Amino acid sequence: MSVSDDLFDQGERIRRQVLGDEHVDRSLANASEFGRPLQELVTAFCWGATWGRPGLELKTRSLLNLAMLTALDRQPELAVHIKGALNNGCTLDEIRETLMHTAVYCGVPAAIEAFRTAESVLGPARGQRPRARPRGRRRRRY
């Protein structure tokens, strides 16, 4: 391995914490000999040297990633990081408000795509509109 073993180990630990073992195992297993150095760089530099820095909680870093990936229109990576944001304790409201904020600074079309991606990740139970309440008889107050 050509990157620092310490940074790689730290990065792998954080990457697994945020994205889950299944995702990390799949990414590393699917890396070809040609692409493996990139996976090592991502793990050591992105996850170890950057996500591992002090100063911001993982939750805050997740919300920043959602905004940046929306700005860059990287929908597949946004989907991965929406799952990671949930793993880091971000609420649906925090995710939604982060994506709402991108409408102003990244453009409404970018935010619309990000919301579509979020809803596909969150699933119908968490991403769809709440059903209207059935109308019943109103109680009279005396």
Image (tube, rainbow, N blue to C red):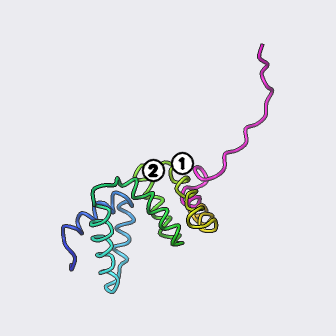
In the rendered structure, the answer to whether residue 64 lies left or right of residue 103 reads left
Give the quadrant of the N terminus: bottom left
x then y, percent, for residue 24: 35, 67
Which residue is tagged 2?
A: 90
Q: Which amino acid is tagged 2? A: Cys
Q: Which amino acid is tagged 1? A: Asp
| Circles 1 and 2: CB atoms closer than 8 Å | no
Estimate how packed mark 2 is, as few (under 14), some (14 to 19) or many (20 or more) residues with alpha carbons within 10 Å.
Answer: some
Q: In the image, what residue occupies the spot 33% across and 61% down?
A: 16
Tell me the CA gap for discs 1 and 2: 8 Å
Could you say which quadrant of the image residue 43 lies in?
bottom left
Q: In the image, what residue occupies the spot 49% across and 68% down?
A: 69
Magenta-drawn segment: 118-142
Q: In the image, what residue occupies the spot 55% across and 57% down?
A: 101
Q: In the image, what residue occupies the spot 30% across and 60% down?
A: 14
x then y, percent, for residue 64: 44, 60
x then y, percent, for residue 140: 79, 19
For mark 1, give the secondary structure. helix
**Numbered circle sitting on residue 3:** none
Which residue is tagged 1?
A: 93
